């Protein structure tokens, strides 16, 4: 692990593995699995990874940066790393709050942040599979050209993410807001958001300095959503 990367042939979830071995993993350490058998999404959902999907977790000491900011920063890190390697895709890479990266309006990557002992584990599943199983509604880098070699992409994402975490720790989300707003897939769209035991409907109004989703509701008010599930957009 002299490059800070733990390589596993198979595991249930790289996030779970990293959380179990947190004491042995330094800031910036990466756990990557060739095959993940029990991937997890937000709110306890299962997350399935077709062969060829990059499934990895980055261990971070976040300082004053919170999980919401880091999840958004991780999405930007994926976008910048892909745009560097495949510049033709740069205009079509967007963020769907709070944790998805979209390519031409289809899901390309998902992010799951989990914390323990004052540390964070950022799990990323990025699809670069040559073929997608029937019924998968997302997309893959292979569908849009020759993707970068997996290790090069992994190192670029880690580098961008660690830079962003350093910025967020010093200045909060402010330095990333222009990029987040430029990549906001929900801005101006009609939304339906499940928040705890209620549903909020309105128009995407952007992302605020605390990483909350703003929804302009009928009548002109603004709902500030800290956590929720987008059910329609």
Image (spheres, rainbow, N blue to C red):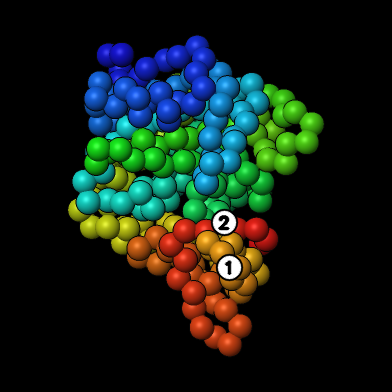
Q: Which of pointers 2 and 1 lies earlier in the amino acid sequence?
A: 1
**Where is residue 219 shown, x and y percent of the image?**
58, 87
* Whether label 2 touches label 1, CB < 8 Å: no
Location of mark 2 (residue): 229
Q: Quadrant of the C terminus?
A: bottom right
Q: Secondary structure at mark 1?
A: strand
Q: Nearer the viewer, residue 219 or 92?
A: 219
Q: How many marks?
A: 2
- Crowdedness of circle 1 by 10 Å Cα count: few (<14), some, many (20+)? few
**Where is residue 16 shown, x and y percent of the image?**
42, 28
Q: What is the residue that sits farthest to the bottom in this orientation?
A: 219
Q: Secondary structure at mark 2?
A: strand
Residue at (44%, 22%) from the top-left corner? 32
Location of mark 1 (residue): 198
Q: Quadrant of the N terminus?
A: top left
- Image quadrant assignment for residue 171: bottom left
- Crowdedness of circle 2 by 10 Å Cα count: few (<14), some, many (20+)? some
The disc at residue 139 is none
Residue at (64%, 21%) from the top-left corner? 51
Residue at (35%, 63%) from the top-left corner? 210
């Amino acid at each position: 692990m002299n490059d800070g990367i733990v390589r596993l042939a198979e595991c249930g979830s790289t996030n779970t593995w990293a959380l179990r071995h947190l004491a042995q993993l330094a800031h910036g350490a990466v756990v990557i699995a060739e095959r993940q058998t029990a991937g997890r999404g937000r709110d306890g959902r299962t997350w399935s990874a077709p062969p060829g999907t990059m499934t990895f977790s980055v261990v971070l000491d976040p300082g004053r940066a919170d999980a919401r900011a880091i999840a958004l920063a991780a999405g930007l890190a994926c976008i910048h790393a892909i745009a560097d390697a495949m510049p033709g895709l740069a205009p079509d890479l967007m963020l769907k709050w709070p944790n998805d990266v979209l390519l031409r309006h289809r899901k390309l990557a998902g992010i799951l942040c989990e914390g323990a002992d004052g540390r964070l584990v950022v799990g990323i599943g990025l699809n670069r599979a040559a073929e997608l199983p029937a019924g998968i509604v997302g997309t893959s880098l292979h569908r849009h050209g020759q993707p970068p070699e997996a290790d090069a992409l992994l190192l670029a994402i880690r580098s961008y993410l660690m830079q962003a975490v350093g910025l967020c720790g010093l200045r909060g989300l402010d330095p990333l807001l222009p990029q987040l707003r430029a990549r906001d897939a929900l801005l101006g769209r009609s939304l339906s958001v499940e928040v705890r035991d209620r549903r909020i409907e309105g128009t995407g109004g952007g992302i605020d300095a605390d990483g909350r989703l703003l929804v302009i509701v009928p009548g002109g008010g603004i709902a500030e959503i800290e956590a929720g599930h987008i059910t329609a957009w």
